Image (tube, helix red, strand yellow):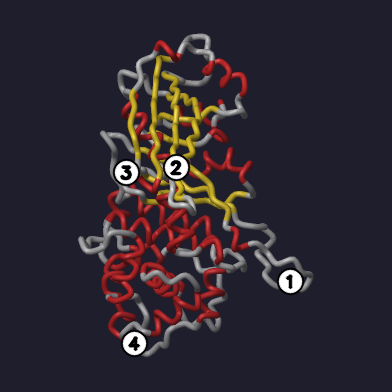
């Protein structure tokens, strides 16, 4: 997204964005506008609806005035569940993702003056096609949807998403995912799959920096990093006791030696994670288990500009994408058990879940809510709260 379009887009309500989405349906016999269908679906997901049937039932409970706010004419009934299903299944899901993500990007911020973007993928297991020859559960020939997403670490909002063939296809897809956005001054964090020289160079050419994990897919680079004299390097350490476990993270960083060749690498890091979990035994005693993992990373920002404690926060922020996005979609929205399989339907529903999560984290303002789930429940009781998120510029 170019910076020139940002001001106009940021002043547009989401219902206005929905109105720009191309409608692939035949206009003959089409009773309900696509933007209205999208608005009803988005309001339903904001209220915690997990299925298209639940979205339709939620729409049934809206008042006439509320429906008119979402664009439904006064003399028109709400679209049926099958109409909503067909409308969403026929969309160009990547185009919808791009339009919504560009709008969400205008609502995000920075961490210490930098925009930190975490990239990671997720397979939608519930959308696996049925094994039969009848054509039931056809997903358009694309197999189980694997979605690559970009999360703004500062706000927890999803700023890009794209469907890829499988996990290995994430490598070239990262460039396609981020290409529409102005990355100047941003930091892109990604797992070891994306630690590729071409990817690193592309990020640098876009005016951004990277923080990439080095694992066995780069054996030569990993061996060189492991061989550095880490015992002589000062460490920064911290302890995390959330989620019922104790994790100590120790991070060390040094400027990249000349003999380590990786495009733009300015510092290399070692992170040691010691995780202690305690389980209660039947006899009332406690049993602790300790595991240690050592991870190496490369970063294109020199240590004097990004000290270890700052990089450690970015690393932890990247690992948190599992909890802040994938876990929320699985647990709060039950995504992995949602068996919608037709056309673009699975990806579109994932997009609407991303949108709901992003709206709640960036715009929704209610001190009484403490989580995505509690915000969903609040908007079930008061649909006007959800409608306002879509209709307010």
Give the structural element (helix, strand or loop) at label 1. Answer: loop
Rendered view: 56 above or below 365: below
Q: Mark 3 points at which residue?
A: 154
Residue drawn 57% across the image and 20% down it:
221
Q: In this view, does 176 lie to the left or right of 72?
A: right
Residue drawn 55% across the image and 80% down it:
82
Mark 4 or 2, which is nearer the eye?
2
Please tell me in which quadrant of the rendered image residue 195 appears: top right
Give the structural element (helix, strand or loop) at label 4. Answer: loop
Please tell me in which quadrant of the rendered image residue 39 appears: bottom left
Please give the label number shown on residue 266: none
Mark 4 or 3, which is nearer the eye?
3
Q: Do the residues labelled 4 and 3 touch (CB within 8 Å)?
A: no
Q: Name the residue under label 2.
A: 277
Q: How far apart are marks 1 and 2 (CA)?
A: 47 Å
Q: Quadrant of the C terminus?
A: bottom left
Q: Dot 2: few (<14), some (14–19), or many (≥20) neighbours within 10 Å?
A: some
Rendered view: 128 above or below 384: above
Q: Where is residue 253 in the image (x, y as percent from the top left)?
A: 39, 19
Rendered view: 305 above or below 90: above
Residue drawn 53% across the image and 31% down it:
199
Please tell me in which quadrant of the rendered image residue 131 appears: bottom right
- Whichever of callouts 4 and 2 sits on the residue coming sooner in the sequence is 4
Q: Mark 1 points at which residue?
A: 135
Mark 1 or 2, which is nearer the eye?
2
Give the structural element (helix, strand or loop) at label 2. Answer: strand
Q: How far apart are marks 4 and 1 (CA)?
A: 39 Å
Q: Quadrant of the N terminus?
A: top left
Q: Distance between the residues labelled 3 and 1?
A: 44 Å
């Amino acid at each position: 997204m170019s910076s020139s379009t940002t001001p106009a887009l940021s002043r547009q309500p989401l219902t206005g964005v929905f109105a720009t989405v191309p409608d692939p349906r035949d206009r003959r016999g089409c009773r309900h506008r696509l933007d209205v269908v999208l608005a009803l679906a988005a309001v339903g997901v904001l209220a915690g609806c997990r299925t298209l049937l639940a979205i339709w039932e939620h729409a049934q409970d809206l008042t006439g005035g509320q429906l008119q706010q979402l664009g439904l004419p006064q003399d028109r009934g709400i679209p049926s569940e099958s109409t909503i299903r067909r409308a969403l299944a026929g969309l160009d899901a990547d185009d919808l993702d791009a339009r919504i993500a560009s709008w969400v990007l205008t609502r995000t911020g920075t961490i210490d003056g930098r925009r930190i973007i975490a990239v990671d993928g997720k397979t939608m297991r519930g959308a696996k096609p049925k094994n039969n020859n009848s054509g039931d559960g056809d997903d358009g020939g694309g197999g189980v949807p694997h979605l690559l997403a970009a999360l703004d670490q500062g706000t927890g909002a999803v700023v890009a998403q794209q469907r890829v063939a499988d996990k290995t296809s994430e490598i070239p897809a990262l460039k396609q995912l981020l290409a529409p956005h102005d990355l100047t001054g941003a930091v892109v964090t990604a797992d070891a799959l994306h630690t590729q020289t071409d990817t690193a160079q592309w990020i640098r050419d876009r005016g951004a920096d990277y923080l990439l994990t080095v694992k066995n897919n780069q054996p030569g680079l990993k061996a060189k990093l492991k061989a550095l004299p880490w015992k002589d390097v000062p460490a920064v350490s911290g302890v995390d006791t959330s989620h019922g476990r104790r994790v100590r993270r120790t991070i060390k960083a040094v400027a990249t030696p000349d003999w380590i060749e990786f495009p733009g690498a300015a510092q290399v890091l070692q992170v040691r994670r010691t995780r202690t979990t305690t389980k209660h035994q039947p006899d009332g005693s406690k049993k602790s288990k300790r595991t240690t993992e050592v991870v190496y990373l490369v970063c294109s920002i020199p240590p004097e500009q990004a000290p270890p404690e700052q990089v450690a926060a970015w690393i932890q922020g990247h690992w948190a994408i599992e909890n802040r996005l994938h876990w929320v979609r699985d647990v709060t929205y039950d995504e992995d058990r949602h068996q919608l399989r037709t056309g673009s339907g699975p990806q579109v529903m994932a997009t609407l879940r991303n949108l709901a999560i992003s709206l709640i984290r960036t715009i929704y303002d209610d001190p009484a809510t403490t989580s995505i789930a509690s915000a969903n429940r609040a908007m079930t009781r008061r649909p006007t709260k959800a409608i306002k998120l879509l209709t307010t510029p």
